[in-house]
Image (cartoon, rainbow, N blue to C red):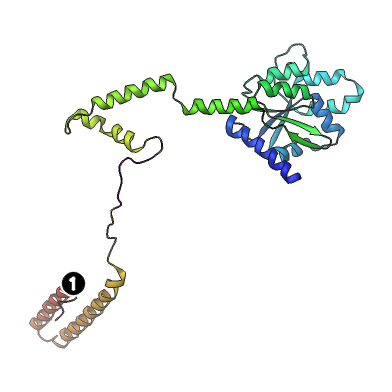
Amino acid sequence: MRVKRQKKNRRTVRFFTVCFGFRQPFKVLCDGTFIHHLVANEITPADTVISDLLGGPVKLFTTRCVVAELEKLGKDFSESLEAAQMLSTATCEHEEAKAADECLSQVLGLQNTEHFFLGTQDADFRRKLQQESIVPLVFGLRNILLIDQPSDFQRETAKDSEKRRLNMTDTEKRLLAKRTSKIVASNRPEGTIANEEWGMPRVISTRNNALGVKDRPQFKRNRAKGPNPLSCMKKKKNNNTERRQFKSKAESNSGAQKEKKEGESDAKKRTRKRSKEGKSGPESTE
Ligand SMILES: [Zn+2]
């Protein structure tokens, strides 16, 4: 059960990271009700528990308005107030403290450009945000934490933004038309300077099209990388050994005929002849 729940939570986090660019460390904005729930149910240390929930490091935030609201609630919330004061402060520009939900709505905005998660126990507030903002919502249920699944609004927004990414904008269309007309104009007989100038982009545009599919078949040319080791190596070795034998013979001959210089030169000539014949092929052996 626990594993299943965790899988569900991770899938929700992945939805927001993939579709809306939420990145680690995840920023979690906490309201008073959420902080109080964490304290009252002893869900501590809060950042560790929440990072377990989201599957990545987290940084917890609150706002001055939330802290001010907790101050107003008196003694029963003194522990929660202390906890809230230890969190980082997300800047809201409220001179006078506003109601927490109003303040948080403004900090998030409809686009949630800062990519905040929001922790709140206020179910109405969560429902409202799900209908109008791109914010993943965290809440506590007794001593466990959960993430609300993406709402229909959030899924639709993700689909729309994906469509927008796939389709060309008007400026992109105009740019494409301009480029293609240039390329068509440059499609003159070969050898002209103009053609050479536009040759490169044309090749790129045909070879590297959107899907990376090559429009012309490309055959791999089988090039000989070297002699076939199975047929050649042995014979070569034999030739080498033969040559060495010849050489050693020639040398020994030359050694025997050390008395006459002419004889020595004869022997050298002979060895050269033989070595050449050996190189020309295996059939030409004497
Ligand atoms: Zn505020």
Along the line of sight, the residue nearer the viewer: 135 or 42: 135
Q: Give the residue furthest to the left.
A: 262
Query: How many marks overall?
Result: 1
Does 202 sit left or right of 93 as displayed? Answer: left
Where residue 203 appears, as percent x and y from the top left, is 29, 36
Q: Residue 51's image quarter? A: top right
Check disc 1 and report the residue beneath it.
279
Which residue is located at x 40 percent, y 35 percent?
Answer: 210
Q: Residue 246's image quarter? A: bottom left
Q: Is residue 14 above or below residue 101?
A: below
Tell me, yes or no, whether the highlighted magenta stretch contains residue 215: yes
Where residue 89 appears, as percent x and y from the top left, is 73, 24
Along the line of sight, the residue nearer the viewer: 276 or 228: 228
Residue 56 in view (yes/no): no
Where residue 262 appears, as percent x and y from the top left, is 7, 81
Q: Give the residue furthest to the top.
A: 96
Q: What type of secondary structure mainly makes up the magenta span? A: loop
Q: Is residue 211 above or below residue 74?
A: below
Tell me, yes or no, whether the highlighted magenta stretch contains residue 57: no
Secondary structure beneath dot 1 equals: helix
Along the line of sight, the residue nearer the viewer: 141 or 72: 141
Residue stretch rendered in magenta on the structure: 212-220
Which residue is located at x 91 percent, y 25 percent?
Answer: 76
